[in-house]
Every structure is written in structure tokens, then in C-alpha cells.
């Protein structure tokens, strides 16, 4: 989903790094399978006057600039400097595509919410995401020396400092939400629900469970690990945005299923195109492509309930699905 960065470990979700687009022949085959999909909004790499096109790249890049600035302000270097430098190294890393915060803002705006209400939670999601990647890369976990084409946190600062940096980022994210969310835009009860949602996502029934299966194996289907490691962050990002925008419980459930499907879709497509030994290795390329189609259909089906808010409001969320499936452009930052 767009919600993790490239790694040498096969199960690792590669996320929105500036990778090569999917080969044209494979894109054509996948598109042919999706001909029956309704509400398909193609992504335009440049702006278009067509009503059925949305410029995701322009939208995404504009949000990245705002989010990067707010993250820079959120993590200044202070005592103890060693921890803060390690935190900044991962959170402010060049090449990060900020998929969790961008999806959070898009979901908030779908319901007419203000970006000012969403930014503290959006930045917190990026902090939590970075913390999970720092810990995943540790020698005792996935033992990945590289993250986003650069040495991973523990490779630069040592495993001990990397653990401390990850440990510090989790509570910093929660503190960021509580201290900076405008009270006139978001009531305290909503803030509590957001904190609870993030805590559940990273906890023993969420991303930690996916990492456990990755380490220990056991009688779990491959889709379980993917759902927990890669679908959970997309699910959380969409739901948090919906909470900030004032979505109903039924709408939050649709966002939950949508975000989970997008996160898993991105990983399945990576497995196909990067020859990772996961879905494609276990079931074959054809079945993996079918799974990608099914996830695309599922994600867009969950969005149909939001068409009543207008095409321009829901277009970003539809376009995330198309990007996850096709990778029609690169985000050059």
C-alpha cells in the first residue's frame, strides 16, 4: 500500500519508492482483467480537463511538501541529540513518499474536513510508520542493512540507538496528536478514538502480529502476514482520516476495508514485478495477478458509498488504487 519502503527481505512491503514502472505488457494484461471494474479513474501524470481524470502526482507532491515541513518542525535536534538525530534520519529520509499521511488527509477531506485538523495525525502516522520500519530492519528482526536505498537506521547509529529512536517515535506521535490537533476542529472524543486506532494497528493484533508470523511462521496463510504487515497501515491511515472528517461508523468500516485492500494490493503487485517469493512464488504469477485484480475491485467497491460526496472529493482515494495496480508515474522529489 504504498506503506513501507524497499527492502531485501522478500516479505518486506516495498512501498512508494521511485521504482521502475510496471512493464507495459504486464500492465496491459492487468488492465484487460479489470475492464469490468466500475468507477475506474485513470491517473494522469499531467493535469487534465477531463472529468474522469485526477492528477494524483500533483496532489501527492503538494501534500508531501507540506508534510515534510511539518515533520521537520516536529523533530528538532535537542538533548539527547543522539536519539533525535537517529529519529530524524529515518523520519526525514529523502525519498519517503508519505503514503500514510497523504491517505489520511485525503480521507479527511472527503468528508469536508480541514487539512489543519488532519496534519497532526498525518505526521504522527509517518512517525509511527518510520518507527516500525526502524524496528523491522534490526538484526534481530529482518536484518536489513538498507532502507530506501540508504543504510538503515541501525547500520548508521547502531542497534541500541535504533531501538531507542523507534521507541521514542511511537509516543512522540501520540503526543503530537494530543498537543497540536486544533480543539475547535476536532473534539477530544475523536482524538481518543484516533489514538486507540493507531495503538491497535501497531500492537499485538496488528503490525506486531504480522512481524511475529514473519519471524516464527506457523499455521497462518500468507495473506495473514500481508494483511497485518502491509494492509494494517493503509487501513489505519484511511480510518484516522475518516474520524477527523466526521465519517459515520458505516463509512469508517468502508474506509477500513478500502485501506486494507490498497495496502495488500501494492504488496501483491510488488511480488509480481520484483520476483519476490511470496504470492507469486507460492501461487504462481497468474494467480497473483488474479489476486491483484480482486483487491483492486474490492477497494473500489468500498469507495462507491462515497460517490455521493462528488467525484472531485473521492478521486484521490480511487486514484490510490489505480496507482497501486499500475504505477503509471514516478514521484520525483
Image: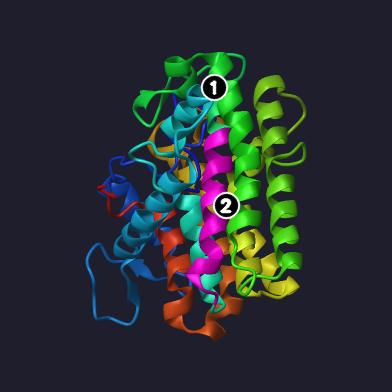
Q: Nearer the viewer, residue 64 or 99?
A: 64
Residue at the front extreme, as displayed: 79
Residue occupying image coordinates x 29% and y 63%: 58
Q: Is residue 217 visible to us here? A: yes
Percent x, y for residue 21?
Answer: 29, 46
Percent x, y for residue 11?
Answer: 54, 30
Q: Which residues are magenta?
A: 113-131
Secondary structure beneath label 1:
helix
Q: Nearer the viewer, residue 333 or 74?
A: 74
Q: Which of the labelled discs sits on residue 317, or is there none?
A: none
Distance from disc 1 to disc 2, alpha carbons, whole Å, reads 24 Å
Please give the residue where the numbered disc 1 appears in the rendered image: 162
Neighbourhood count class around disc 2 (C-alpha, 10 Å): few under 14, some 14–19, many 20 upward = many
Left or right of 321 in this view: 299: right
Q: Quadrant of residue 28?
A: bottom left
Magenta stretch prevailing secondary structure: helix
Please give the residue where the numbered disc 2 appears in the rendered image: 234
Q: Earlier in the sequence, mark 1 or mark 2?
A: 1
Q: Are marks 1 and 2 in contact (CB under 8 Å)?
A: no
Q: Is residue 121 magenta?
A: yes
Neighbourhood count class around disc 1 (C-alpha, 10 Å): few under 14, some 14–19, many 20 upward = many
Percent x, y for residue 192?
Answer: 75, 59
Percent x, y for residue 212?
Answer: 71, 27
Left or right of 293 in this view: 174: right
Residue occupying image coordinates x 32% and y 57%: 61
Location of residue 248 with respect to 137 vertically, above or below? below
Q: Is residue 260 visible to us here? A: no
Residue occupying image coordinates x 39% and y 42%: 96
Q: Nearer the viewer, residue 189 or 58?
A: 189
* Of the two numbered discs 1 and 2 in the rendering, the one whose residue sits closer to the viewer: 1
Left or right of 235 in this view: 144: left
Amino acid at each position: 500500500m504504498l506503506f513501507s519502503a524497499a527492502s531485501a527481505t522478500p516479505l518486506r512491503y516495498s512501498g512508494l519508492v521511485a521504482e521502475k514502472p510496471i512493464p507495459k505488457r504486464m500492465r496491459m494484461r492487468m488492465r484487460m482483467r479489470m475492464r469490468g471494474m466500475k468507477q475506474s479513474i485513470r491517473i494522469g501524470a499531467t493535469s487534465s480537463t477531463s472529468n474522469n481524470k485526477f492528477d494524483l502526482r500533483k496532489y501527492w507532491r503538494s501534500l508531501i511538501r507540506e508534510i515534510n515541513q511539518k515533520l521537520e518542525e516536529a523533530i528538532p535536534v535537542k538533548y539527547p541529540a543522539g536519539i533525535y538525530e537517529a529519529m530524524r534520519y529515518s523520519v526525514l529520509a529523502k525519498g519517503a513518499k508519505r503514503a500514510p499521511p497523504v491517505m489520511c488527509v485525503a480521507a479527511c477531506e472527503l468528508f469536508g474536513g480541514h487539512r489543519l485538523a488532519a496534519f497532526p495525525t498525518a505526521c504522527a502516522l509517518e512517525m509511527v510508520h518510520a518507527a516500525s520500519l526502524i524496528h523491522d530492519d534490526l538484526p534481530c528482526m529482518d536484518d536489513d542493512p538498507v532502507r530506501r536505498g540508504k543504510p538503515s537506521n541501525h547500520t548508521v547509529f547502531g542497534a541500541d540507538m535504533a531501538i531507542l529512536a523507534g521507541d521514542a517515535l511511537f509516543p512522540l506521535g501520540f503526543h503530537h496528536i494530543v498537543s497540536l490537533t486544533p480543539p475547535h476542529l476536532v473534539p477530544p472524543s475523536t482524538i481518543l478514538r484516533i489514538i486507540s486506532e493507531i495503538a491497535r494497528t501497531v500492537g499485538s493484533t496488528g503490525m506486531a502480529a504480522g512481524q511475529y508470523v514473519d519471524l516464527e511462521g506457523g499455521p497462518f496463510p500468507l495473506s495473514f502476514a500481508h494483511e497485518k504487515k502491509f494492509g494494517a497501515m493503509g487501513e489505519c491511515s484511511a480510518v484516522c482520516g475518516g474520524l477527523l472528517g466526521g465519517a459515520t461508523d458505516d463509512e469508517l468500516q468502508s474506509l477500513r476495508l478500502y485501506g486494507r485492500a490498497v495496502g495488500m494490493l501494492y504488496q501483491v503487485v510488488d511480488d509480481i514485478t520484483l520476483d519476490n517469493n511470496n504470492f507469486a512464488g507460492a501461487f504462481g504469477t497468474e494467480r497473483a495477478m488474479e489476486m491483484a485484480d480482486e483487491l483492486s475491485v474490492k477497494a473500489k467497491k468500498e469507495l462507491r458509498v462515497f460517490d455521493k460526496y462528488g467525484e472531485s472529493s473521492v478521486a484521490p482515494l480511487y486514484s490510490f488504487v489505480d496507482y497501486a495496480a499500475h504505477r503509471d508515474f514516478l514521484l520525483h522529489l
